[in-house]
Image (tube, rainbow, N blue to C red):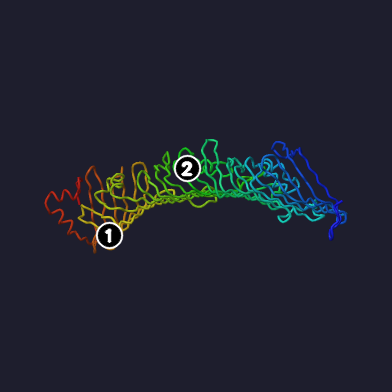
Amino acid sequence: PKPAAAGEEPAYRYDLTSDGSTLAPSESPEPALQFLARIAGVYQPKSRKLVAEQIGVRSGGSGEVLGAATVAFVDNGPPGVSLSLNVHDMPVSHVKQLWPWFSARNARLWVLGNLFGGTVTDANLQFQVVPGRLGNGVPLTGDEVFGRFQIEGSRFDTAGRIPPVRDAVGVVAFHGNDVDIALSSGSVYMPSGRTVAASGGALTIKNANRPIVVGGLDIDVAGEAPAIAELASYEPINAMRHVGLAPEDLSGTVTGHVRADIPLTKGMDTSKLDWLVSLDYQDLSLAKPFEDQTVTGADGSITVGPKQAVISAEAKLNGIPAELDLVEPLADDGPARSRKVTLILDDKTRNASMPGLSDLLSGTIKVAIDKSGEDAQQVSADLTNARLDIPWAGWSKGAGIPAKVAFNMAKSGSTTTLSDFALDGKSFSIDGNVTLVNGALSAARFSKVALNRGDDVAVSVKRAGKSYAVDVSGASLDARSLIKQFTSDVDTATKGAGSNAISV
C-alpha cells in the first residue's frame, strides 16, 4: 500500500522492471528487439484506475522512450485508456517495434511497411479513449489518437514503381486514420544510377482504414534532365510515354514539382488516378530531332497531365532562336492540338537558312508559325523593323515603317505553296498566292498589288529556267521608279534585276 497522504485516494504501489525483454510484432519486417523497461505507478481500487506514472524503455545505445498512462475500468464494456509516449534519438527500426499495436493501426501498418532505416530524433504519441469506446465499430478520431515523428536519414517507399526516397529528413504525423508525411530533403536513386534531389515533399493519406487507400503525393524535384525524365517515366505517373523521348535523349538541368495520386493498396484502377508533372528546364537539348527540328539551348517549362502536355520554351531550332508554345492532347477528351513557334531571324541566321530572301529583306524580324491544324501552317511576321526591297520594281520600304505579312504554308515534296499571302502597310499592300520549288520562286499570282498610292493592278509571275515572265494588268500603276530604273545605264538595270532575266 502507498503511505496515506491527506486528500489522496488510497492506492497500491507497483514498480516493474525488466532487463531482458523481447518485442517481435507479427506484422513487422524488423528483427526482434531486445530492450530494458520500467513501469511504475499506482492502482486506485476506489476509482478503479491503474496509473502508470512512469514508463521507460531503453533499446541499447542512447535512444529511449518515456511516457505515462492511465487505464480506467468500468463494470460493462472496455476500459478507458490514456497513453502518452515520447521518443528521443532512437533508431526507426526500434520505434516501429515499440509502436503499440492498438494505437492508429493503419498508420502503424503503413510505417511498418514503408519506412526503413535512420533515426527518430523526436516523437510523441497520444492515445485518449473514454471508457466504453474501444471496439464499438467506429474508427478512432484524430482527437483520440495522434502522433508525430521527426526522422533523419531514413528511406521512404512511396508506391507504384517510383523508386524510394533515401537520406530522407522529414516528419511523419497521423491523426486517427489520416497520415501526413512531410519531406524536408532526400534523394531518389534510380536503377540506372541517376539521382534526383527531392525536397518540400508531402504524402497525404486520408482514411487509411478503407479497403482501397489512395495517397496524395506532392514533391519538389531537381536534377539533370535524364534523371528527372526517368523519374517521370514510372507508374503510376508514366508521363514520358506521351512525349516519345527516352531519358538518354535529353541533356540539361531541370527543377519542378510532381503531384500524383498514389495507390497504397492493390486492386486500384490506375488509369483513373490524377497526376501533374510541372518542370522548368535550362539549357535543355535533345539528342535526336523532334518533329524534324534540332532543339538546343532550351529554357522554359513543360506541364504534363493525364489529358495534355503543355510546352513553353525559348530555344534554338536548327540553330535559329525561337519561342515555342505547344499543346499536345494525350487523351480523347483532351484539348485541341496546338503548335505555335516564333522564329527570331536576323540577317545572319536568315541568310544561312533562307539565302533566297537576302535580296528582298534585311534586318531582324519575328516570324510566327502556327502548326495547330492538320494541313497548312499559318505564318505571320511583323516587318516593321526590317527593310523590304523589290529591286525589279524599284520599290523599297525602310526600317521603322509598319508592315505585316501573313500566309498559309503547305508543303508537298519539293513544292511549297503560300496561299492567302497578304503583305500590308499604311500605303502599300500585296495579296495573292505564291508557289516555291526547292525554296525558289516558281510562280506567283497576286490579285491585288499596290506599292504606291493609287496603284490598282494584278500581277502574275512565272519562272522558266532562270528567267521570269511578269504580267501586269489593271486600272492604274505608278511606274515612275520602274521606268527610271530600266532607262538608266545598263549596269544599274542589271544589278536591279539580280542574276535573273525578267520580262515585264
Q: In this view, does 197 lie to the left or right of 450?
A: right
Q: Where is residue 86 in the image (x, y as percent from the top left)?
A: 70, 49
Write down the residue under mark 1.
400
Find residue 263 and name its label. none
Write down the residue under mark 2.
225
Q: In this view, does 199 lie to the left or right of 123?
A: left
In this view, the residue in front, 13 or 495, is 13
Tell me, yes or no, if residue 268 can be seen here.
Answer: no
Crowding at mark 1 (Cα within 10 Å: few <14, some 14-19, many 20+): few
SS assignment at label 2: helix
Tell me, yes or no, if residue 32 can be seen here.
Answer: yes
Q: Is residue 417 left or right of residue 492?
A: right
Q: Which residue is drawn at 25% across and 46% down?
A: 463
Q: Where is residue 371 in the image (x, y as percent from the top left)?
A: 42, 50
Q: How far apart are marks 2 and 1 (CA)?
A: 42 Å
Q: Which amino acid does label 1 sit on?
A: Gly
Q: Position of residue 435 (x, y in %)?
A: 31, 48
Q: Which amino acid does label 2 sit on?
A: Ala
